[in-house]
Amino acid sequence: MRARRSVWSTEEIALLKHVVSLYEYRRVNYVVVSQLFENRTVADIKKRCQVLRDREGRRARWRSQRAPRPRPRPRPPNPEPPNPEPPNPEQPCPEPPPFEYVDEISYGEKLHPALVWRAPDWYDLDPPML
C-alpha cells in the first residue's frame, strides 16, 4: 500500500523555500529546518525539498525545450583577402645572361693569397641545436 500523501499549505512551502534558499550553496541542515515546522519530521522536510527541486528542474527543462530555437544569423560574404605583399617600387633585377655565354674564370688552381686554410677549432663550430 502506498503512504497517504502529505498536504502542505502554501505558507509552509513558501517558508521552506525561503529557509532552504538561505543556505545557498552550503549543505542544508534538515534537523534545524524541521524545528521551524510543527508536525513535520526531518524525513518529511527532505522529501518535500526533493520534490520542489525536481519540480523546478522539470519546469526549467520543459521551458528550454519549448522555447523557440534561435535562428542562425546569416554570415556575410567573404571579402577578397588582402594582398600580403605590397607592390615593389623598385625595378626588378635584370635576368642574368645564359650560362653558355659566361666566360669561365680560372684561378689557375690556386687560391687567392689572402685565403689561408687552417683546421677548424671547437669554438669555430656552432653549438648543437637540441
Image (spheres, helix red, strand yellow):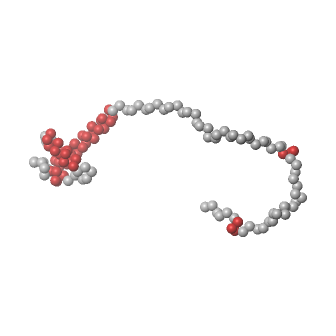
Residue that appears at 81% across and 63% down: 115
Which is nearer the eye, 29 or 103?
Answer: 103
Q: Position of residue 32 (x, y in %)?
A: 16, 53
Query: At which x and y percent is residue 60?
Result: 29, 38
In the rendered view of the protein, which quadrant contains the C terminus? bottom right
Which of 41 and 19 lies nearest the eye of the viewer?
19
Q: Is residue 103 left or right of residue 73?
A: right
| Residue 52 pos. (x, y %) | 22, 42
Image vertical order of residue 46 relative to residue 118, above or below = above
Please tell me whether residue 71 is drawn above or below residue 55 in the rendered image: above
- 57 relative to 84 in the view: left or right: left
State the residue at coordinates (69%, 68%): 122
Q: Residue at x 65, y 64 (%)?
A: 127
User: What quarter of the picture does the N terminus occupy?
Assistant: top left
- Residue found 43% across the figure and 32% down from its top: 72
Residue 47 in view (yes/no): no
| Farthest residue, direction left | 38
The outermost residue toward the right is 108
Q: Is residue 114 visible?
A: yes
- Residue 80's spot in the image, x, y percent? 58, 33
